[in-house]
Image (cartoon, rainbow, N blue to C red):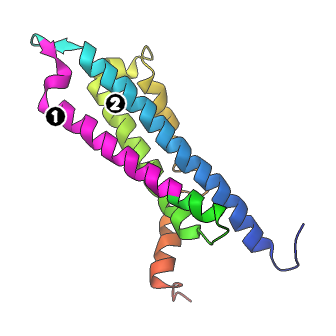
Amino acid sequence: IGKKGDGWNQAMRTLNSGRIGIAAGAVGVARAALEAASKYVKDRKAFGRPIGDFQLIREMIAQSAVEIDAARLLTLRAAHLRDLGQDNTIEVSMAKLYGAQMAQRVTDWAVQVHGGYGFSGDFDVERYFRDARILGLYEGTNEIQKLIIAEHILGPSSKK
């Protein structure tokens, strides 16, 4: 299986690979939510025009696109470092943390632009919203990712 005493490193490499997959999944869920929301706001009319014409709806759509791309780039960087055989623990933690948080925000906005229909189950955004929630829990919670990142920046905790 490996060298004696190398178990922790092997476990971290395995977790890091899984975490990259979760970060990529977060991008996918958020993209699907953005596509569904974009279609809906073009079709749904209020006050005689598509709700996608309203500034706050446009802001949610634009912010979603920016956050999705940022998460995608963090994920690509983590995966690229893995492909190069370099340590990518911090990059993986950043990609997973940001991806999970981003997916929750984007799916929340997608539900919001659907109004009451967003919770009805008649639209996929309701499922995306639920799917996004688990991303910050498995393979290391968001809080664990923050601890990993902080330890990289500050060094080990001095608690006794």
Q: Residue at x 44, y 54 (%)?
A: 73
Q: Is residue 152 left or right of residue 46?
A: right
Q: If the image is split into quadrants, where does the C terminus sit?
A: bottom right
Q: Residue at x 55, y 42 (%)?
A: 25
Q: Residues within 10 Å of mark 1 (few under 14, many from 20)?
A: few
Q: If the image is split into quadrants, where does the N terminus sit?
A: bottom right
Q: Is residue 66 left or right of residue 88?
A: left
- Outermost residue, top side: 48
Label tally: 2
Instruction: Give the amino acid at mark 1.
Output: Leu
Is residue 134 visible from the viewing direction of this image?
Answer: no
Q: Is residue 41 left or right of residue 145?
A: left
Quick check: is 50 in the magenta stretch? Answer: yes
Residue corresponding to mark 2: 110
Residue range of the region highlighted in magenta in the rendering: 49-76
Depicted 129 relative to depicted 25: above or below: above
Which residue is nearer to you in this view: 117 or 62? Answer: 62
- Give the x, y percent position of residue 87: 62, 72
Q: Residue at x 43, y 43 (%)?
A: 103
Depicted 155 relative to depicted 33: above or below: below
Depicted 1 relative to depicted 23: above or below: below
Residue 64 is tagged as: none
The secondary structure type at the circle numbered 1 is helix
Q: CA distance from mark 1 to mark 2?
A: 13 Å
Residue 56 is tagged as: 1
Which image quadrant is residue 5 in? Answer: bottom right
